[in-house]
Image: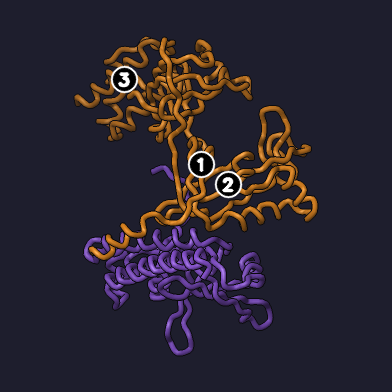
Chain colours: A orange, B purple
Amino acid sequence: MSDVRQHARELHERFSEHLDVTEDEITERLETLVSEYKVPVDEARRSVESHYLEEAGLERDELGSGGANPEVAIEDIEENEQWLDMTAKVVDLWEPGHESIGQVGLLGDETGTIKFTAWASSDLDALEEEKVYRLSNVVTDEYEGRFSVKLNRTTTIEELDEEIEVGENGAEVEGALVAIQSGSGLIKRCPEEDCTRVLQNGRCSEHGDVEGEFDLRIKGVLDDGTEVHEVIFDQEATENLTDTTLEEAKQTAMDALDTEVVADEMRAQTLGRYYRVRGPRMGRYVLADDVEELDGPTDTESVLIEARSI
Amino acid sequence: MSQQAPTREVARRVFAAEFNDAEYTFKESEDERAPQYVLLPSGERANRVFVVGTLTETEDVGDDSEYWRGRIVDPTGTFYTYAGQYQPDAAAFLRDAEPPEYVAVVGKPRTYETDDGSVNVSLRPESITAVDADTRDRWVVETARRTLDRVRAFDAETDEYDGLAAEEYDAEPERYRDVVVEALESLDDDERSADAGSEAAEQGL
């Protein structure tokens, strides 16, 4: 019984601001579901919560988690729909792509950066670039393996008078480059402002047929024999890696009447070689800020000693 | 882990001596499209491997259409790789190659039974590229390390693939420790002879 009581108390705390409902009423609802209808208590709680959400005209997001959240570092965010508190600096603010979005941008702490979204309907104080805030009651979201945080009506924002040295999401990976994926080489991007989507057959998935702008990129896979790491080289990193400029790549494609030859040349130049790549982690990719081609082995003797000792 | 599915298969590191012993293949599910694995005798499944060695010979062994075979030699033995019309880039590489040269191959292990009933293991390339001696040497040491890791962790009682290897293969995993030592010693000798060679060159010999 105390289980039901406990849930009722928590639900009451969360709804008391929004609804005129007593703890006893909530208990009764839970009790009916659990005792009479044999609904598991978690499911019962969910059902009762939905009932009151509807009554109050709230979305689940807007209610908050109720109770204390863990304070989570950005690099440790790896769970969808987790309620948490964070202290972070506003690294960048972007133009909202839709009127339902109040603010969108990048938050950073010592461990890395993460995208944030604040809904227009949440009526929050606007965040300012370069300032550090303590954000309580934000919720994580996952899209195609990338995490972001959402600020919502229950989020509290407190400006802090401190500085944060924003870290680069700390990734360093190495291994043999075993694949260069499609969508690499000489590509075209949508020229619409803030779009930059890669065109497929001259089409942007958002803006339709457009006159694309050329860019260089490599989506590669580093493999060390135990793990694979996906790595993205942007134009500069690609130029450095392949010793080919964007202009040269365009010329090559023009001579061959085919853009695919650029990626083929890149494969011939780089596949099978060993690299160490450092840079921020963006979802499943590491962005190659710093790339080093690895030379011959340095540990031959020690591995030999190890082998002989088995 | 909230990893994306399907996860890309890791490219295992394995010397030719062990690779050519890996005759047992299996799938983890009934699904027709389920990935196929060879069982490495040191107790690991391999759907993909990465090898670096010396391409010593190429030959078009096809009848109607081109079907290229390449021999790739590491310090312990020879990998055979075959590329035809479904691996056009790899086939083109082998056609144009001028052995000997160092090459890196990412590929899938394949087995086939010969007329006399023995099983041959080969490599179907996803890519073949020319690389330098440093990359080759790095691969030898890396492959030595990965092989040692497998040999050391071998426990037929507790590990599924180790158990399977104990069942399917006669050779003890310790045999591949000897292969590792052999490979590393050859690298050591290479270095010495390379040093000797450059000294000789410096002295104008």
Q: Can marks 1 and 3 be said to lie on one chain?
A: yes
Give amino acid for label 3.
Answer: Ala
Q: From the viewer's perspective, tell me whether residue A242 is left or right of residue A27.
A: right
Give the residue at x 50% y 40%: A286
Query: Disc 3 marks which residue?
Result: A68
Which numbered disc, 3 or 2, marks the residue closer to the eye? 2
> Between disc 1 and disc 3, whose residue precedes?
3
> Element type at marker 2?
strand
Secondary structure found at label 3: loop
Residue B25 higher or lower than A65, as above or below = below
Are the two marked residues, 1 and 2, in contact with CB atoms closer than 8 angstroms?
Answer: yes
Q: Residue at x 68, y 39 (%)?
A: A205
Residue assigned mark 1:
A285
**Quadrant of the snapshot with the C terminus of chain A:** bottom left
Residue A219 marker: 2
Badge 2: chain ID: A
Instruction: For the residues labelled 3 and 2, say whether their Cβ atoms are less than 8 Å apart.
Output: no
> Which chain's residue wears label 3?
A
- Distance from the alpha carbon under mark 1 to that under mark 2: 9 Å
In the image, residue A279 lies at what x, y percent?
49, 37
Q: Nearer the viewer, residue A254 or A227?
A: A254
Q: Quadrant of the N terminus of chain A?
A: top left
Dot 1 and dot 2 within a common chain: yes
Whole-percent x, y for residue B82 in the image = 56, 74
In space, the residues marked 1 and 3 are separated at their CA atoms by: 32 Å
Amino acid under label 1?
Tyr
Q: Is there any visible trace of residue B39 in the rendered image?
A: no
Q: Is residue B114 left or right of residue B167?
A: right
Q: Is residue B171 left or right of residue B15?
A: left
Under circle 1, the secondary element is strand
Evaluate if marks 1 and 3 touch, with contact meaning CB atoms under 8 Å apart.
no
